[in-house]
Image (cartoon, rainbow, N blue to C red):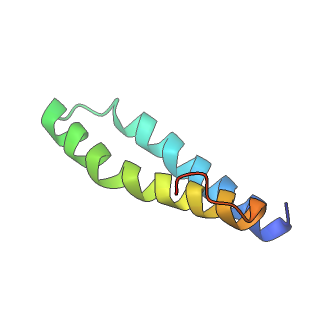
Amino acid sequence: MNETTAEELGIITDELESLVHATKLPMPSDFHLEQLKQLLPEKIKAIRDIIVKETGENPWE
């Protein structure tokens, strides 16, 4: 893993951690759920892209 990829993973990890902390904010459950529905697929795609880039294989095909 190169430095750029490690940094990308670090950023995604920080973003996921922020989402976890955001669920503790006093907001309606529906708000939290909609935010997670919107943001989690983006994070999944970013992680999958890194895996494909690092391994040269796409296990989801």
Which residue is rendered at x = 35% and y = 53% of the image? 39
In the displayed structure, 17 sits above or below 38; it is: above
Which residue is rendered at x = 17% and y = 31% of the image? 29
Q: Nearer the viewer, residue 25 or 45?
A: 45
Residue 2's quadrant in the figure?
A: bottom right
Q: Please identify the residue farthest to the front as the structure is shown.
A: 61
Residue 46, percent from left and from top: 54, 61
Count of all numbered marks drawn on residues in the image: 0
Would residue 25 be found to the left or right of residue 59 on screen?
Answer: left
Would residue 56 be found to the left or right of residue 43 on screen?
Answer: right
Residue 28 shows up from this direction: no
In the displayed structure, 28 sits above or below 6; it is: above
Residue 27, percent from left and from top: 19, 35
Residue 58's quadrant in the figure?
A: bottom right
Q: Nearer the viewer, residue 56 or 20?
A: 56
Which residue is rendered at x = 47% and y = 44% of the image? 18
Residue 54, percent from left and from top: 76, 62
Q: Please identify the residue farthest to the right as the structure is shown.
A: 2
Point out the image quarter for the N terminus: bottom right
Q: Nearer the viewer, residue 2 or 11?
A: 2
Residue 50 shows up from this direction: yes
Which residue is rendered at x = 67% and y = 57% of the image? 51
Would residue 36 be found to the left or right of residue 4 on screen?
Answer: left
